[in-house]
Image: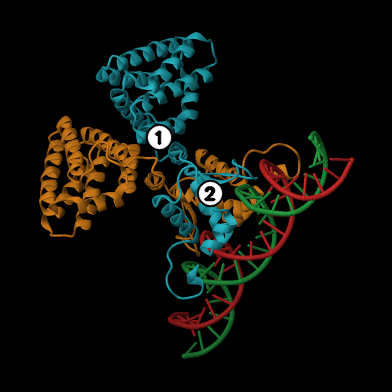
Chain colours: A cyan, B orange, C green, D red
Amino acid sequence: MWSNHINYYCPMKTHQLVLSWIENELSEGRLAVGGRLPAERSLAEQLQVSRTSVREAIRILEAMGVVRAGVGSGPEAGTVVISDPTAALGSALRLHVATQHLPVADIVETRVLLESWAVSHAKPDSPELAGASRLLEKMDAEVMEVDEFLALDVRFHLALADAAGNAVVSAMMGSLRESITGYASRLTANLPNWDATAARLRIEHHDILAAVHNNDGERAAKLVAAHIEGYYREAGVGPGEQSE
Amino acid sequence: MWSNHINYYCPMKTHQLVLSWIENELSEGRLAVGGRLPAERSLAEQLQVSRTSVREAIRILEAMGVVRAGVGSGPEAGTVVISDPTAALGSALRLHVATQHLPVADIVETRVLLESWAVSHAKPDSPELAGASRLLEKMDAEVMEVDEFLALDVRFHLALADAAGNAVVSAMMGSLRESITGYASRLTANLPNWDATAARLRIEHHDILAAVHNNDGERAAKLVAAHIEGYYREAGVGPGEQSE
DNA sequence: TAGTTGATGTGGTTGGACCACATGCCCTAC
DNA sequence: GTAGGGCATGTGGTCCAACCACATCAACTA
């Protein structure tokens, strides 16, 4: 911007200027979750940059799960601050998996690591565990499609992760799952007998939940690790396997 | 786009269309790390969208550490595919810390978790450990400023994390550190006696490295956890402390 | 009073224009 | 023939002016 008029070196791109202004407003507490950003045109005038640059900054924040943009008027309109760390981490991981610089094996290993820790630190009386229990009942009671079962499975594991009460671990777990959902879904085609596998998964889920309820974190961690690794092994993804 | 002309519902924003096209090119292997995206103008024409929309998509990829944009001509110019997962996760975490929806305590806890796992799975003969060793020598030999010491400290811990050979864990560790560097730097002001603390940190670093070299992963993990938690406790950030 | 219609303000998208930068070719001067 | 300068080309960076679709609200009308 300035570098166009005077000769001072200005290393910051215009949209980064907007970005840092917004980040500063957040840090200082003048903008909080639920609050609204100024309209794009006002912000552009206020910061003396073009609306294009403001939009680029907002796009980045949107991709990071920091804001949500809505057209029209009323409570749902405008650009409002939200907080969805999972979205940011998830799409970032997915993209880097696409570049094939993040092996799927490493993602699975990290998932085992995080989830083992989560169940061993979960509070047995947390509301998230009650939700996990209800999910298991639903998985037991109904006959369902493979994809529907897998969707409930994801929610069950995320509920387990949430029960540990660490927002960062929860967000990372969610993003790891999101980044490999497509991959995990294709894996089911490799399974020799889906019904048998599903039955085994149901039993293991109950064992894990029981261990958590008994405050036996160590056992829960071992069961979770075996549960996850067993699934991928059965689907043909052993250690050293290629990513997709 | 289409929704402007015919009445079919088109839920995808134009820049997301570009985004998914690029992601697909990556997945299919037609674009790989080191490769170049078509020029913005060509891509816009090819996908039948405006250059603005292409730029918004590229901005997001740039923020995610997937591409690097350079002006001019020659090998450094154009938009080339890179792979820097740490950048993406780091800025995402930093922003969400700014919204005060990710407690710093959770970040520290996650760091302990990941780093403990890393040292307990590090290969004693990995080249990263040799690098870590050299960093320790430098920290021992020279008298330096606080910030310089902290910078070396960061590099040492990242080298430890890399030694485990899991790209996801490495990226997450890096992003966690990046998201709280500013915070950690301010913490040093709380320390009663920096020189004494620095001396202790040096000793603990050597102990950790020795444990890893002795293939005593369990001991290394315990030492790392105590090392990190001890530092934050001394700086006045105990369990349940407020984030910034 | 009830329904319609327009004013207003939001983000979404587009095309065009100009800039700074970096390369490489071509043409000139030696 | 060679070395030098200068322009053509192509890149991303920035800005502007306009238009669209949407949602709300107020004023106006029947």
Q: Quadrant of the C terminus of chain A?
A: top left
Q: Amino acid at mark 1?
A: Ala
- Foreground residue, A230 or A114? A114
SS for tag 2? helix
User: Label 1: which residue?
Assistant: A171
Front-lying residue, B130 or B230: B230
* Labelled disc at residue A72: none
Q: Please name the residue that numbered disc 2 is placed on.
A: A59
Whole-angstrom CA distance, mark 1 to mark 2, is 21 Å
Residue drawn where x is 41% and y is 49% of the image:
A29
One can see residue A193 in this view:
no
Q: Are marks 1 and 2 on the same chain?
A: yes
> The disc numbered 1 marks a residue on which chain?
A
> Where is residue A98 drawn, in percent x and y?
47, 39
Residue B160: percent from the left, percent from the top? 23, 42
N-term mark: 1 or 2: 2
Counting from the top left corner in percent of width and height, residue A179 is at 45, 34
